[in-house]
């Protein structure tokens, strides 16, 4: 991979990977560290990628692994303040903070599946391949995550 | 919801300065080399030997205990995770999460493995607890219901014992094979915390879980457990209508060893209704794993509760076949019975 190719890949995918890392690590600093380590590995990765999708899938997979590694090997249990993290995301719109808190309370796998499905537009079977799960499991995760968030939104509307 | 999710993630963006730093760092820093690789390899070997030895021991034991009741202890129950369960019971105030980590239904009893854990908001005193106790037979106590019908918990008192950070226990209830298990409700008003037998505090609930259950049934589960026979189907799940995706009524997972198939050729999984007609296949995923092939397949709704599953190799030969009696098809049937 040439320097130019590498820079263009970083610019293309950095925010996708950053959001996935954020789902797991819930703070800016660790998420940046995670993404940085992923790109260090990419820069030194020798094997060719079959196509763009293969590259993207590799990056997502490595980001998830790296984020989990940061959580476990550094023994950083999730002692973050979700409320603070949500306010960091919505610096200018506090009305949305409550929803983002609920989203961040979800199991990281759930929020990552929601992100890939809604924001990145992946299909359930594609997410299943990315996360080494069955399509049935992904659909169950989607259904449960939606249910949890819907419950919250319903309560908000009732209030 | 779609809008809210998209809106949230569109706000999470990395700083432009950070992008530049990351590019420069990646070019100058080498990836960390694993300097304790041999330690990891040695540890992996030891773990493999221990697990292998334990597996041989348990298989031998189960082969010898043909007529004895299978061991459904907490440690073993995760092996029998044959019900697709809901997630967790959340306690709002004391930072305790109770969840069902495994479930098994053997045609007479339903076993639920419970797991509890304190989160970061826990009260200081709770750190000291070594046992948590739920007493089922008191007023407003724990109850367990299947499709709205109350079921008596067999245990007089449920002790969640500490294993590392996790508290665990197993509960069971008599459930008839005719029960259509699609909804399980478990509620716990409060849990007492003890340290070395001395009461220290109460965790105030309520913990309430009401979740859809996907009935999962493997033919001859008892046979598998007691005789150690080789059965390639890990599970076949009858899925309540609309629970996962419209049109999916059965989900099958199996693992077929290489010696039985040509690795390059696909293996087919076919499900037949009792009248011999096929249940519509929807999607199939095959993946090479270890010394075999893993297959996950989804099917439409079966017409009958008794179905036959055939695994067929590339030559059209049946590798293995099973007759399966599905339990909660009242909810899964596409047509009224």
Image: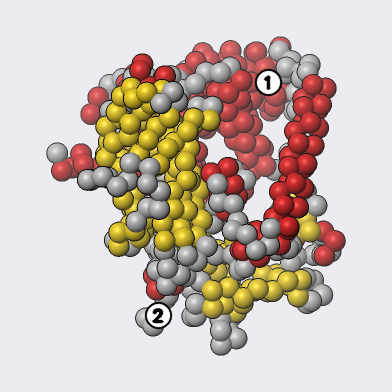
Which residue was labeled with disc 1? Answer: A40
Q: Nearer the viewer, residue B239 or B118?
A: B118
Q: Is residue B69 visible?
A: yes
x, y (%) of residue B315? 82, 75
In the rendered view, tell whether residue B50 sits above or below residue A27: below
In the rendered view, tell whether residue A44 sits above or below residue A110: above
x, y (%) of residue B316? 78, 77
Q: Quadrant of the C terminus of chain A?
A: top left
Q: Residue furthest bottom?
A: B275
Q: Quadrant of the N terminus of chain A?
A: top right
Q: Nearer the viewer, residue B88 or B278?
A: B88
Identified at 54% across, 78% down, the residue is B306
Q: Nearer the viewer, residue B95 or B296?
A: B95
Residue B267 picture quarter = bottom right
Identified at 72% across, 18% down, the residue is B31
Q: What number is the disc on residue B335?
A: 2
- Disc 1 on helix, strand or loop? helix
| Coloration of the structure image | secondary structure
């Amino acid at each position: 991979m040439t320097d130019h190719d590498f820079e263009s890949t970083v610019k293309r995918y950095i925010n996708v990977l950053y959001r996935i890392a954020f789902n797991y690590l819930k703070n800016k600093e660790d998420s940046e560290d995670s993404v940085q380590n992923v790109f260090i590995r990419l820069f030194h990765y020798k094997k060719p990628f079959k196509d763009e999708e293969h590259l993207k899938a590799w990056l997502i997979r490595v980001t998830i692994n790296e984020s989990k590694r940061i959580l476990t090997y550094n023994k950083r249990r999730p002692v973050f303040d979700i409320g603070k993290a949500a306010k960091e995301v919505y610096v200018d719109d506090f009305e949305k903070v409550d929803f983002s808190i609920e989203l961040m309370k979800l199991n990281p796998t759930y929020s990552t599946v929601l992100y890939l499905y809604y924001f990145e537009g992946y299909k359930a079977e594609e997410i299943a391949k990315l996360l080494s799960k069955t399509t049935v499991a992904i659909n169950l995760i989607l259904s449960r995550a939606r249910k949890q968030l819907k419950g919250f939104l319903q309560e908000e509307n009732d209030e | 919801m779609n809008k809210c999710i998209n809106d949230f993630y569109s706000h999470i963006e990395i700083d432009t300065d950070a992008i530049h730093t990351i590019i420069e760092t990646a070019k100058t820093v080498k990836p960390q080399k694993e300097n304790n690789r041999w330690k990891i390899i040695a540890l992996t070997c030891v773990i493999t030997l221990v697990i292998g030895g334990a597996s041989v021991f348990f298989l031998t034991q189960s082969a010898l205990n043909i007529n004895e009741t299978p061991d459904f202890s907490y440690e073993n129950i995760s092996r029998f995770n044959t019900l697709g369960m809901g997630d967790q019971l959340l306690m709002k105030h004391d930072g305790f999460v109770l969840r069902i980590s495994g479930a098994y239904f053997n045609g007479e009893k339903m076993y639920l493995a419970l797991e509890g854990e304190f989160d970061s908001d826990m009260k200081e005193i709770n750190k000291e607890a070594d046992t948590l106790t739920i007493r089922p037979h008191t007023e407003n106590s724990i109850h367990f219901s299947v499709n709205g019908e109350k079921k008596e918990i067999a245990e007089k008192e449920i002790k969640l014992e500490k294993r590392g950070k996790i508290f665990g226990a197993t509960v069971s209830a008599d459930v008839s094979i005719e029960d259509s298990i699609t909804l399980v409700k478990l509620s716990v008003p409060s849990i007492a915390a003890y340290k070395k037998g001395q009461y220290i505090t109460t965790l105030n609930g309520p913990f309430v879980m009401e979740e859809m259950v996907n009935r999962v049934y493997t033919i001859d589960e008892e046979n598998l457990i007691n005789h150690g026979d080789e059965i390639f189907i890990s599970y076949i799940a009858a899925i309540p209508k609309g629970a996962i995706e419209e049109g999916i009524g059965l989900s099958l997972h199996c693992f077929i060893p290489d010696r039985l198939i040509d690795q390059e050729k696909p293996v087919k999984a076919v499900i037949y209704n009792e009248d011999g007609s096929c249940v519509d296949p929807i999607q199939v995923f095959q993946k090479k794993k270890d010394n075999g092939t893993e297959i996950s397949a989804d099917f439409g709704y079966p017409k009958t509760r008794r179905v036959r599953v055939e695994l067929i190799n590339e030559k059209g030969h049946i590798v293995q076949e099973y007759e399966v009696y599905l339990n909660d098809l009242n909810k899964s049937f596409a047509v009224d019975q």
